[in-house]
Image: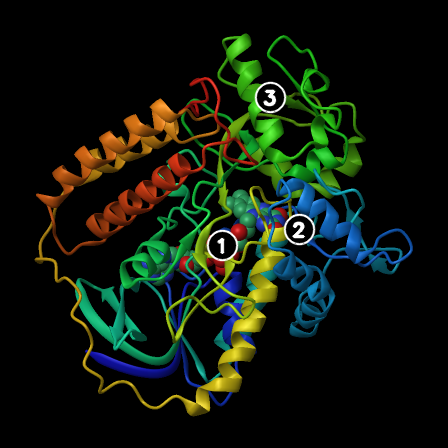
Amino acid sequence: MNKKCDVLIVGSGLAGLYAALLLDPSLKVIVLTKDLMKESNSYLAQGGIAAVFDEEHDKPEDHVNDTLRAGAGICNLQALHVLVDEAAQNICNLQRMGVSFDQENGKLSLTREGGHGRARILHIDGDATGKGLMDVLIRNAQSRPNIKIIEYSLCVDILMSNNRCIGVLALEKDKLNYYYAKSVILAAGGLGMIYGITTNASTLTGDAITMAERAGAEIKDMEFVQFHPTVFYSKENKRFLISEAVRGEGAVLKNIHGERFMHNYDERQELAPRDVVSRAIISEMDKTQAEHVFLDLTHLNRAYIFKRFPNITGKCREYGIDISTAMIPVSPAQHYLMGGIKTDLWARTSIPGLYACGETACTGVHGANRLASNSLLEALVFANRASKMITASIENIKDLSQSREQRTEMLPPGNCDVSAEREKIQVSMRKYAGIIRSVEGLNNCCKMLNEIENSLQKKKCLNKEFIECFNILTTAKSITHQALKRKKSIGAHYLGEEKGMLRA
Ligand SMILES: Cc1cc2nc3c(=O)[nH]c(=O)nc-3n(C[C@H](O)[C@H](O)[C@H](O)COP(=O)(O)OP(=O)(O)OC[C@H]3O[C@@H](n4cnc5c(N)ncnc54)[C@H](O)[C@@H]3O)c2cc1C
């Protein structure tokens, strides 16, 4: 089946839906999403969005400097200034759409998180920022006659003609459908499933990055993968994030003997950047031969903590932990990708007609490591810019649906079980391309990924499991290859002794 629209968006997270809502309403927009539309990292976000609103104590330049420091000084400065300068206007846009940020005494309630020198994080319903944002955006998008959201539509490839993107190919109910569009926005998020142990939604398998790379787009900074230091630990691998904001409010880390340890690693202690805290925890876990450390907030005001973190309080309670009286077992897990599809200041990739925004894109704002609460902001600012650029230029683009597309490889229909390959990729990546890496380990990883690729090639078939597994493999290879090219430790790419394996 062939379908036509003006703008095709892949992904129903913050970047995808916000871009859809800001496009000119006269444009016909289709949003494809591979599962239910709520299945996204955006929906899971807890802590909040960074933006300078306290003009008395905070300045945009401070936000720039904190981001640069977390990013180990290699952030794209132009993009970073755009991010910070356009933060407030995008927050106001959200408020106009009906998003209601938490307030205190009639003013926006601002909190502090690791790496931020000032309180500048806006949040919703305490620690349920993602849900608060996305419920409003989904409602808005569903009520707009020019936007059609198609669930359970897995985008598998980008359609190209004469080196221009002309649409996408999507797998829907075991059938391939062709979508032609004048502009395509990839907003398909990150790649947590490459590591298996992750805070990410289950749909995040690096699909857009693989598709864009295959189409010839430039992919950048893949070695910079962020691991969140404080993810709830359970033997059954039922992970969920314990937001940075909890440490921002005064929670402290302790080893299994109940001793604080962050002062041995960094003077900023619990509020040091995520890579520093993650390595400190891994090191402490090794020293104490433990599978986790603890996050302790039992000394904080009980009523305030329950009000400020209702979501975390409730989830911990499900696992039998009252956070006002017991410490929370935590260990690091994969959380975010700083790299991705290289884009310019207007979210354009190196392929004409193809845009990318949100976590799948690499604007360079995060440098070697992302500052907390900057990713929702990045998704907003650059999705807005993508929609402005598309709205301004779409009139000049002719109907491309009759163009002869370069054929994409057709997989034979059928069913194939690739669960063993998927598991092997995750284990290799955890072992060799995690928090602490070595050249030898990364070379081993490449070897293992090549072997897995040989086994996958023999199983080729057109089903969701195979496509995701192939995307996981391709993205894992990009991470390992780019990590091998980066000879020195910087930010989230840390070369050291080979003992940084994420615990399953
Ligand atoms: C638990 C958690 C908490 C977080 N908390 C914060 C926070 O407090 N502040 C902050 O700034 N950041 C936070 N982040 C990071 C932030 O949420 C994400 O970086 C951001 O939401 C990414 O938005 P996105 O729109 O790019 O991608 P997502 O929101 O992940 O959306 C991607 C969408 O694409 C779909 N998709 C993927 N592949 C395909 C395909 N092949 N075909 C069709 N659809 C596809 C997915 O199903 C999903 O709907 C958090 C992340 C997690 C996991």
175 in relation to 491, above or below: below
User: Please, is residue 169 above or below residue 50 in the view?
Assistant: below
Q: CA distance from mark 2 to mark 3?
A: 25 Å
Q: Is residue 169 left or right of residue 456?
A: right
Q: Quadrant of residue 114?
A: top right
Q: Alpha-carbon distance for marks 3 and 1? A: 26 Å
**What mark, if any, has residue 359 been given in the picture?**
1
Q: Secondary structure at mark 2?
A: loop
User: Where does label 2 land, which residue?
Assistant: 48
Mark closer to the observer (2, 3): 3
Q: Position of residue 354 (x, y in %)?
A: 39, 71
**Are dots 1 and 2 in contact, CB under 8 Å?**
no
Q: Residue at x 69, y 35 (%)?
A: 246
Quarter of the image where one finds residue 180: bottom left
User: Can I make out residue 121 in this image?
Assistant: no
Q: Secondary structure at mark 3?
A: helix
Mark 3: amino acid: Ala
The residue identified by callout 3 is 280
Mark 1 vs mark 2, foreground winner is 1
